[in-house]
Every structure is written in C-alpha cells, then in structure tokens.
Image: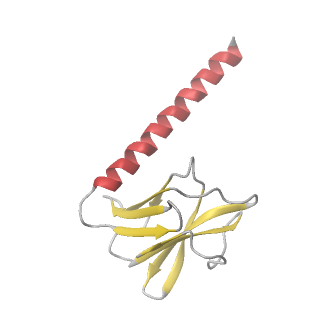
C-alpha cells in the first residue's frame, strides 16, 4: 500500500511538472513579436522569448540524443558563443530558463554534447537561430 501511495504521489508531481512545462511552451509560442526563432532538420524548432527575469528557450521536435550525450544551449552575441547550460528533452520538448536578459544576445543554437557539456559546440546544431 505504501508503494502504491508513493508511486501515486510521484506520478502526480511528474504530471504537474509536465503540465507546467506544457503551459510554459504554449505561452512562449503565442507571445508577441519579441522572440528569436530557431529551426533545424525535421520537425525541430525552437524560440527564445523574454520573461520578467531573463529569457525562456522552448523547443519541440527534438530528436533523441545518443547515449552519453545531452543537449546544450548556446547563446550567441555576435560572433561570441557562450554556454546556456545543458538540458534533456521529454518527448522532444524542452524548456530552459536563460539567466541573461532578452536583448543582451543576438541568437541561440542547440547541439548534442557529451554528458556534462562542452566549452564550445562540438557537433552541428540541432536547431539554430534564423
């Protein structure tokens, strides 16, 4: 009985987290004109939109990364590219908070990198700003 209750509680947390992520994605996709669009091969697309505290990166259609790999978000400021952190996707969907203020950078891209991330992109972009 304890195992069932624990599983039920954990499932509800996962469901709430999924719903929260879905809400963030939907809000980001329907926001106004201030956004950076990213595209990739297949169905992979993304957007960076402003938030009160910085920016939010959302993506859909991300293909699974290989074993030992994670996605890494890169922030472009002209020719300078810095890491925005590593992340995983769930069913091809990702939501990543960007600590930098929207407008302080010019674009973004995502690559598949070794677990723990890289200092610079080491693979072709999965999505890149257009």
Quarter of the image with the C terminus is bottom left
Q: Is residue 117 visible?
A: yes
Residue 97: which quarter of the image?
A: bottom left
Q: Is residue 5 left or right of residue 59?
A: right
Q: How many marks?
A: 0
Query: Could you say where residue 113 lies in the image, as x and y percent from the top left?
Result: 67, 69
Identify whether 76 is placed above or below 69. below
Query: Could you say where residue 85 lies in the image, as x and y percent from the top left?
Result: 56, 65
Q: Is residue 77 left or right of residue 69?
A: left
Q: Is residue 53 left or right of residue 17?
A: left
**Residue drawn at x 61%, y 76% as measured from the top left:** 124
Residue that protrudes farthest toward the top in the picture: 1
Identify whether 67 is placed above or below 9. below
Quarter of the image with the N terminus is top right
Query: Could you say where residue 58 lies in the image, as x and y percent from the top left?
Result: 44, 57
Residue that protrudes farthest toward the left in the picture: 32
């Amino acid at each position: 009985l304890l195992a069932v209750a624990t599983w039920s509680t954990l499932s509800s947390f996962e469901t709430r987290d999924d719903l929260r992520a879905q809400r963030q994605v939907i809000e980001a996709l329907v926001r106004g004109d201030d956004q950076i669009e990213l595209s990739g091969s297949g169905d992979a697309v993304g957007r960076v939109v402003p938030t009160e505290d910085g920016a939010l990166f959302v993506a859909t259609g991300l293909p699974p990364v290989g074993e030992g790999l994670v996605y890494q978000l890169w922030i472009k400021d002209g020719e300078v590219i810095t890491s925005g952190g590593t992340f995983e996707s769930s069913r091809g969907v990702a939501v990543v908070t960007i600590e930098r203020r929207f407008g302080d950078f010019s674009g973004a891209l995502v690559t598949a990198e070794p677990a723990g991330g890289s200092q610079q992109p080491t693979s072709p972009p999965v999505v890149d700003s257009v």
